[in-house]
Image: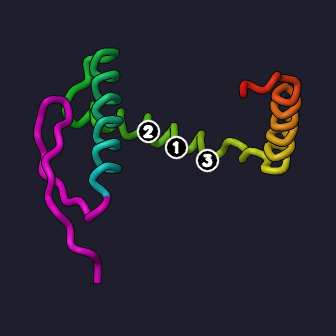
Amino acid sequence: MSAPSHTIEVTLMGRSYRVACPPGEREALETAVAYLDGKLKEIAIRTRASGERLAVMAALNIAHELIELRAAPAPDAEALRSRIGALTGRVEAALAQQDPLF
């Protein structure tokens, strides 16, 4: 059985829509709406597309971004730990050379 959803109103390209939103997901949904609205406006400025064509173009652009992110190599955790350790050592060495304030 799924959790109950609440209906909230969102605005895309100046039009209001009522959508279901699970409890605790409102902030994430609002972030997604803001991102989509920005993409729609960006495409509307660059092209003469409107309505369904504009929505399809935005969906394709966002899908392309997602595919690129998934294809990007994951950061090497061990390399990051090593870099953080080196930077921590440099900070500690610099702090050790400072005169105490009190």
Taking the view exactly as shown, the residue that stands out farthest to the front is 102
- Residue 97, compared with residue 80, is above or below; it is above
- Label 3: how many residues lie within 10 Å, few (<14), some (14-19) or many (20+)? few
Taking the view exactly as shown, the residue that stands out farthest to the top is 46
Q: Count the numbered circles shown.
A: 3
- Identify the residue at image location x=19%, y=30%: 13
Q: Are marks 1 and 2 in contact (CB under 8 Å)?
A: yes
Left or right, 68 with respect to 38, comes to: right
Q: CA distance from mark 3 to mark 2?
A: 12 Å
Q: Amino acid at mark 1?
A: Leu
Q: CA distance from mark 3 to mark 1?
A: 6 Å
Residue 98 in picture, x, y percent from top left: 82, 23
- Identify the residue at image location x=88%, y=30%: 93
- Identify the residue at image location x=72%, y=47%: 74
Residue 99: image tag: none
Residue 66: image tag: 1
Q: Which residue is mark 3?
A: 70
Q: Which residue is mark 2?
A: 62
- Identify the residue at image location x=56%, y=44%: 67
Residue 32 in picture, x, y percent from top left: 34, 43
Q: CA distance from mark 1 to mark 2?
A: 6 Å
Q: Are marks 3 and 1 in contact (CB under 8 Å)?
A: yes
